[in-house]
Amino acid sequence: MIDPTHDLPVSKQAKILRMARSTAYYKPVPISEGDLALMAAMDRIHLDRPYAASRLMRDLLLRSGFAGVGRRRVLSLMRKMGIQAVYRKPNTSKRHPGHKIYPYLLRALPIVRPNQVWALDITSLPMKRGFLYLCAVIDWFSRKVLSWRLSNTMHADFCVEAVQEAIVKYGKPEIVNTDQGSQFTSLEFTEMLKGHEIKISMDGKGCWRDNVVIERFWRTVKYEEVYLRAYETTSEARKYLHEYIAFYNTGRGHQALDYKTPDEVYFVNQVAALAA
């Protein structure tokens, strides 16, 4: 937007655009190699120890050989990655007045067919330089990944797109379950679900087990795909994730599914449900 080669001085361009002149001169500082290695280690720790807050995270990093890592640095990187310790705690945070929190609808609910409940969540993916965010929509009954999206921001739009694609491909579910993240409590996301007459379910605050199906998928995709590579670009990450998720749906048996694949369970039971 600011053109330093233009005849009009940068200061006047900034004034016209109503922005600080310092902003026009700002150049983003790339993430250091040390921070990238630290963030990759933190991602693994968070996956295995989701209850680790900044103090425990720091201690585990020190034991892993990251000398001189302080709590403030760990806390700063956790915020950058969008991760936080998961545990039950009193609800002392002030909710945004426009962001309604919905009750958890799955407790004691028998999930017996495809498209009865979809699970939705976001996780961070380490790359060679930086991080991406992966949003996935999973059918709870069959574990099938119905759709997914990559983004370099945590805005709600890529979550909305993932659900809309899944609806176009597979029809609408009865319930969509998410956590209480701002992307899922946003009006953009909840109004989209209401427009399709889909019931909204949200995990209890800090209760990652309420959405355990997708949490298990994060562990699987990271250890079987993401951690084995260092993606250079978003397009490279998209290519390899596309290949892995296709394998996950069609070629990887699951113990919880009696060693059938998600596609086998989804489509056989979907046909049976339609016939009934």
Image: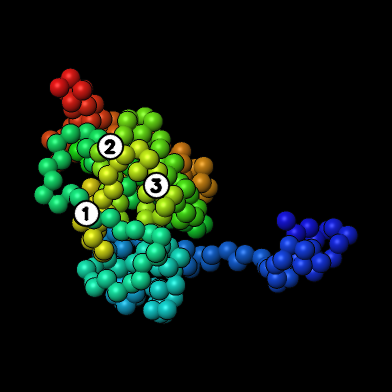
Could you tell me which secondary element the residue under label 1 belongs to? Answer: loop
In percent of width and height, residue 190 lies at 37, 49
Q: Nearer the viewer, mark 3 or mark 2?
A: 3
In percent of width and height, residue 11 lies at 80, 69
Q: Is residue 41 visible?
A: no
Q: Residue at x 31, y 34 (%)?
A: 172
What colour-coding does the image apply? rainbow
Residue 104: numbered disc: 1
Q: In the rendered image, which quarter is residue 147 located in?
A: top left
Q: Residue at x 84, y 65 (%)?
A: 9
In the rendered view, tell whether residue 168 sits above or below residue 9.
Answer: above
Of residues 96 and 136, the one drawn nearer to the viewer in this rendering: 96
Residue 191: numbered disc: 3
User: Can you name the residue that lies furthest to the top here?
Assistant: 275
Query: Crowdedness of circle 1 by 10 Å Cα count: few (<14), some, many (20+)?
Result: some
Q: Of marks 3 and 2, which one's residue comes earlier in the chain?
A: 2
- Which quarter of the figure is the C terminus placed in? top left
Of residues 68 and 192, the one drawn nearer to the viewer in this rendering: 192
Q: Residue at x 22, y 37 (%)?
A: 116
In the rendered view, tell whether residue 185 sits above or below residue 38.
Answer: above
Q: Of marks 2 and 1, which one's residue comes earlier in the chain?
A: 1
Q: Is residue 179 visible?
A: yes
In percent of width and height, residue 130 lies at 50, 58
Residue that badge 2 annotates: 173
Image side of residue 177 versus residue 71, left or right: left
Image side of residue 272 versus residue 124, left or right: left
